[in-house]
Image: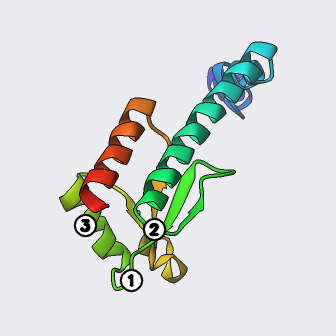
Amino acid sequence: MSLHQLWFRRHSTKFNGASYPVQRGAAAVFSPEGKAEVAALVEHYMGNAKLLREACEKIGLTVFGGVNAPYVWVGCPEGVDSWGMFDRMLEQAQVVITPGAGFGAAGEGYFRISAFNSRENVEEVCRRIAENLG
């Protein structure tokens, strides 16, 4: 057998699928320690979502989500489209949100705030929303 054929077979077999480090990482998620870490991370992000929900509700916005997923969907105020709300949040509160129009026509009229951040940053976002948009 030629060296090329041996090398090709080795690479075809060895690199067909997830790498060993990725496999080990995936297996670690299902260990008792991994499950505890994942639960703590989910609890952290859902706590962030709760804070974001409450901050938006306190200024009179209609809020969806953030209960079973770390994304908070918020209805835009009357007369403001999702890009207008993006501009308002950025200019008045220095907060970046995702305009709902980016998710298609059904997203227009809404914006999304992600809870994937540190607690300190989320608390700052909530403060800025209350002080600058309330």
Rendering quarter of residue 79? bottom left
Q: Earlier in the sequence, mark 3 or mark 1?
A: 1
Q: Quadrant of the C terminus?
A: bottom left
Q: Secondary structure at mark 2?
A: loop
> Which residue is identified by label 2?
61
Counting from the top left corner in percent of width and height, residue 3 is at 64, 20
> Which residue is identified by label 3?
88
Q: Earlier in the sequence, mark 3 or mark 2?
A: 2
Asked if disc 3 and disc 2 are in contact, CB closer than 8 Å, the reply is no
Residue 9's label in the rendered image is none
Residue sitting at x 50%, y 44%: 51
Graded by Cα atoms within 10 Å as few (under 14), some (14 to 19) or many (20 or more), the crowding at tag 2 reads some
Q: Which amino acid is tagged 2?
A: Leu
Drawn side of residue 35 relative to residue 43, left or right: right
- The residue mark sitting in front, 3 or 2, is 2
- Vertical position of residue 69 compared to residue 121: above or below: below
Q: Which amino acid is tagged 3?
A: Arg
Q: Secondary structure at mark 3?
A: helix
Counting from the top left corner in percent of width and height, residue 105 is at 50, 83
Counting from the top left corner in percent of width and height, residue 98 is at 40, 61
- Vertical position of residue 46 compared to residue 21: above or below: below
